[in-house]
Image: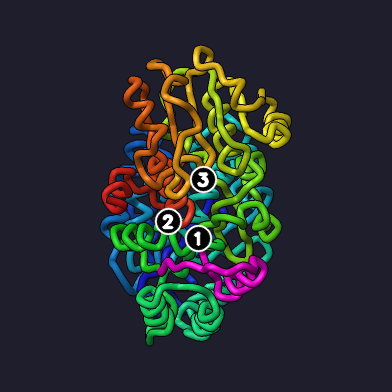
Amino acid sequence: MRIVLIGPRGSGKTTIGALLAEGLGYRLFDTDGMVERAEGMSIPAIFEERGEPAFRAAETAAIRALPPEGVVVATGGGAILLSDNVQALRTGSLTVFLDADDAVLAARTEGSTRPPLTGLSHAEEVAAVRKARLPLYRGAADFCIDTGGLSHADTVTRIQACIDERRSVAGCREFVTFLQQTRMERDEWQVTIERLCGAEGMPLHGIFAVIGNPCLHSRSPELFTALFAACGVDGIYTRIEWPDLGAIMAAARAAGVKGLSVTIPFKSDVMQYCDEITADAHAIGAVNTVVRCGDWCVGANTDWTGIRQPLAGTPPGRAVVFGAGGAARAAVYALQDLGMEVTVLNRTVERAHIIARHFGCEYGTPDTYDPEKTDVIVNATPVGMEGAGGSVLAAGDLRAHQTVFDLVYTPPETKLLRQARATGCRCIRGTELFVYQAQEQMRLFTGITVDAALIREILG
């Protein structure tokens, strides 16, 4: 096994890495030192003479040259910026994120000869860079340790305890005991038991799950199991269908579950179990992704990304969102981020009013829809779903200049999309939401960005 230390400058990676390597009887590899030896010059000189891209290329080469086991690796603060580097570092490794608060990091790195990355003051730059990289650090890490109040020796002790914990099967068995009362298909259940209760203990990169009631229909376990295999992530992704969210979260915390995909009806209620809510999730009022880093749980929302990405490049115009639930809120947020003027239409106008007041947009009932004044249409209702056929609009309500995004993904080609295609509209299937929200979720879970085409291939 290989131990990889990641984190910002000043978190103590090199010094702690040396102590840890000595205690484990491993060799220490410092990627910054490897770069300087390979290039024959200091890192500040590389930045000054060749620029950051040249440094990143040399850093990637150093990462590729690392031995696969029996070593401790201390990485540079920006090693996690390239997804391929993260994947290479994580394969066969336990990754530890060493962190400290902004003030501690600024004090530790004051007077450093490293080149500045921004035009900000030293303290401001430390804070800005750490904030920007924090989701990647958290995703790429199997364990997270705040070194601010710890000695180097205490940090090493903490890391060794984490390693022992990952090798233990006790936490896995307790989690399986909880899973036994939940609903799961027999074949999937058998795979989960074998993976969690095997002689090797917990998977190297931990446990992930989709939670909801219901969630037996979710394709997330199939998707993420395939993505993990493709990216060298030794994790297990299961499902937890259970009505009691409190019990689910207690079991997940006790087992050290790394990541959760959250579906109905828990997207709002799960926020109370998170220690931190990202700005987008807070604005939308819903969390569909929970990432655990140490004892800290972060709630995020990737649904809006799944709506925004397929619409990227659409000229700003006037958009209409049908519906007033959680999907509609994510859609409004995404459309406004794209510079659209948004109107929410819902049969229960009071619900549309609540969303409009929250986001500062227009609202009304479906009969106020005007096709001549609408450029983008998003269906965020269940209308058109299998068992709830039909369309929110008649064929005569569509115009060729419009973009129509139906968030319903079963079936992939809804009545609304068939009507829109026949009219000459640009059409976006609901499966695209699933593709791009899963892509962002994978990044938050693992620090690895996968190609959307790979996700489409897996989903078929």
Marks 3/1: CA distance? 31 Å
Q: Are marks 1 and 2 in contact (CB under 8 Å)?
A: yes
Question: Label 1: few (<14), some or many (≥20) within 10 Å?
Answer: many
- Three-letter code for the amino acid on which mark 3 is drawn: Thr
Q: Is residue 445 visible?
A: yes
Name the side, left or right, on which 330 lies relative to 92: right
Question: Label 3: few (<14), some or many (≥20) within 10 Å?
Answer: many
Residue 75 is marked as 2
| Front position in the image: 62 or 401 | 401
- Please tell me whether mark 1 sits on a helix, a strand or a loop: helix
Q: Are marks 2 and 3 in contact (CB under 8 Å)?
A: no
Q: Can you say which quadrant of the picture contains the N terminus?
A: bottom left
Q: x%, y% of residue 244?
A: 64, 69
Magenta-drawn stretch contains 214: no
Residue at image point 42% right, 84% down: 197
Looking at the image, is mark 1 or mark 2 earlier in the sequence? 1
- Please tell me whether mark 3 sits on a helix, a strand or a loop: loop
Viewer-nearest of labels 2 and 3? 3
| Residue behind mark 1 | 13
| Front position in the image: 417 or 289 | 417
| Residue behind mark 3 | 302
- Three-letter code for the amino acid on which mark 2 is drawn: Thr
Q: x%, y% of residue 314?
A: 43, 22
